């Protein structure tokens, strides 16, 4: 009896693990492409990219709020 209950509990716990790895695939993006897309998205949202720094494997994007159609 205990063996049957143990197997049932084990089957319930292992079932979600079988689905792991079958989700949407992730892919790598070249750093220069990532910067282009970042500039484009920030520009569409009304921000201005000031500069992009590379520190080790990281890229730091400096940006500020644009004028968003307002002057002065």
Image (cartoon, rainbow, N blue to C red):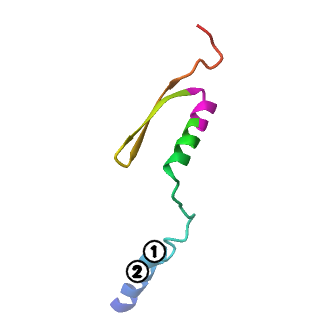
Residue 10: x percent and y percent? Answer: 39, 82
**Vertical order, 2 against 67 (above or below):** below
Residue where numbered disc 2 is placed: 9
Residue 49: x percent and y percent? Answer: 52, 29
Foreground disc of the pair 1, 2? 1
- Residue at 43% x, 78% y is 14
Residue where numbered disc 1 is placed: 17
Residue 70: x percent and y percent? Answer: 63, 13
Mark 2: few/some/many CA within 10 Å (<14, 14-19, 20+): few
- Which image quadrant is residue 59 in? top left
Side (left or right) of 72 relative to 63 = right
- Residue at 53% x, 61% y is 26
**Vertical order, 1 against 27 (above or below):** below
**The C terminus - image quarter:** top right
- Residue 43 falls inside the magenta stretch: yes
Q: Could you tell me if residue 48 is visible in this image?
A: yes
- Which image quadrant is residue 48 in? top right
Q: Which mark is residue 68?
A: none
Mark 1: few/some/many CA within 10 Å (<14, 14-19, 20+): few
- Residue at 42% x, 76% y is 13
- Residue 24 falls inside the magenta stretch: no
Viewer-proximal residue, 53 or 44? 53
- Which image quadrant is residue 55 in? top left
For label 2, the SS is helix
Magenta range: 40-47
Q: Residue furthest top?
A: 72
């Amino acid at each position: 009896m205990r063996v049957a209950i143990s197997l049932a509990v084990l089957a319930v716990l292992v079932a979600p693990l079988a689905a792991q790895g079958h989700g949407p695939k992730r892919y790598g993006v070249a750093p220069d492409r990532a910067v282009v897309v970042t500039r484009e998205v920030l520009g569409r949202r009304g921000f201005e990219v000031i500069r992009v720094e590379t520190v080790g494997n990281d890229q730091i994007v400096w940006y500020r709020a644009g004028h968003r159609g307002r002057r002065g």
